Amino acid sequence: MSSEHDEGREVGDGFCSECYGLGHSRIVKRDVKGFREIYVRAFECEDCSRKTEEVQLAGQCDPQGVRLRLSVPAGDAAALARRVLKSDTASVSIPELEFEIGTGSYVPFTGDLTTISAVLLRACKNLNMNQSERRAADAETAGKIDTFIMELEEYAEGKHAFTFEVEDKAGNSYIEGPAGSAANGACEGGDPLLSVERFDRTPAQESRMGLAMPDEFLPDEEGGAAAAGGGGGQPPASAPGRLILRVEGQADVASFMAAYAEPAELSVDAVLAAPAGIELPRVCGVCGAAGSAGFAAALHRPAAGVGLVGGCLVARASCGACSATSAEVRSTGGVPAQGTRLRLRVEGPADLERAVLQSASASLAVPEVELALSTGSEGGVATTVGQLISLLATQLAGKPALAPGGGGDAAEEATDWADFGASLRAFAAVERPWTLELTDPLACSLIGPKPADAAASRTEDPQVQVVRYERAPDENAHFGLAAGGGAAPIA
Ligand SMILES: [Zn+2]
Ligand SMILES: [Zn+2]
């Protein structure tokens, strides 16, 4: 299926995640019939010959979302060996097992290019990861998970017929056709095992907010379903170069740069003097194009008045070859001794025009409706109060299936959920006052002034309360700030 298969270009060495041996990566361009041209980072380990393929997706998005349903007959090795691209915006589910693998990937803005059976086996591996501790703490749950893993392995080996469903709101996923033919049902004569449904995204889905659902809305492991998406660790918060915020796409990057960065690029001298850890890429991270092929990157200072505590620089990259565009806010080092909790009392329409920068480390809450969300690892949000609450209203109201399902009255829960959505919509219209709370252990989030106050250079803002607080030991550990602090647990 890769008609333009070339040997690609070497992009360097790396360590194998399986045996920690040394391996090599190449970036290969492939034209996937029925999908599009993709750039694959292919890794091969010298020691254990493990091969992985990761697809770079930054800035790419199909006009529509896609829902793929592959009926895998029992004992059909060819169906199990079909290639599948699961992007970081895709979830995979197996309805027969009530099992779902959530969105997200180890490296943001990439997808795993693998096979149907490998997806299931990897889920088994992820589920198995914390089993020894779980066995000690809760033998009953561990036993149920063991049973489930064995069942899932049987599915991966083709002992049962099942449905493999991929839902991707960005349309960045595919399942190849029989015998490596065109993907997503575009093969000649159609694909008898695959149903392909395309759908228009809601405005909420359009935004790449990267908001994670609160834990209580995730399926309960005991119920037989578990979220097995990899979370990934993060570098210590005090290391220069830590990602605070990432904006993608030409339009979003342009408006972000206009509002939050000084227009002048830093000179070569200033770039050289930037703290170690902040480095500008020399080639496009998506397609590998170099400067001569239209790739450009530059460092900017944050605009005056954007008081991101602790210091930061803005790195902008744009590629003329594949049109990927991004802006990243990266810290220049120091972490304040205390975290901050910003509390905005939203009282009128002017408050909706305030800027909000929610850093990658911050969580968001609307106490009036007991809403609490963490950003996950996707790199923060740059938006306004009004956009933020409207998106939450649409995004959360569109997900009744995520309401807790634990034995309660279903009709009652549906009503509660509808009330919840209605409250958020009322907040978006400022029908009554409400509170937006941003808690950031690393103190690099921001709620801007009302436009009129900013124009008049008024610094007093009675509606914003800033509370500084001592980080809890587990917060320090999470961000690598305490001795012996580990990275965030996976899954
Ligand atoms: Zn290896
Ligand atoms: Zn590129």
Image (cartoon, rainbow, N blue to C red):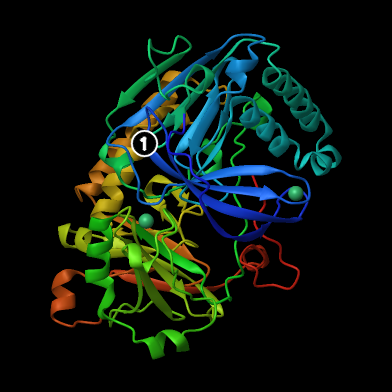
Q: How many labels does the image show?
A: 1
Q: Residue at label 1?
A: 36
Give how far across and how far down residue 400 sits, in percent: 40, 28
Q: Residue 197, can we see it?
A: yes
- In the image, residue 292 lies at what x, y percent? 34, 67
Under tag 1, what secondary structure?
loop
Front-most of residues 139 and 331: 331
Asked whether 98 or 195 is in front, the reply is: 195
Pick whichever, 471 or 328, lies toward us: 328
Q: Quadrant of the C terminus?
A: top right
Horizontally, residue 120 falls left or right of residue 310, namely right
Q: Looking at the picture, how far across and down is residue 36, in whole percent? A: 36, 36
Indicate whether 400 appears above or below 72: below
Task: Report the residue at 53% width, 18% height from top.
Answer: 179
Residue 126 occupies which quadrant of the picture?
top right
Q: Where is residue 384 in the image (x, y as percent from the top left)?
A: 26, 59
Asked if disc 1 is less than 8 Å from ligand 2, the answer is: no
Q: Type of residue at label 1? A: Arg
> Quick one: label 1, few (<14), some, or many (20+) residues within 10 Å?
few
Q: In which quarter of the image is residue 304?
A: bottom left
Work out whether 378 lies above or below 330. above
Q: Which residue lies furthest to the right in this view?
A: 136
> Horizontal placement of 464 versus 5: left or right?
left
Q: Is residue 317 visible?
A: no
Picture residue at 31% right of the left edge, 63% below the top:
294
Seen at 40% across and 24% down, the residue is 67
**Residue 14 vs residue 437, the one in the foreground:** 14
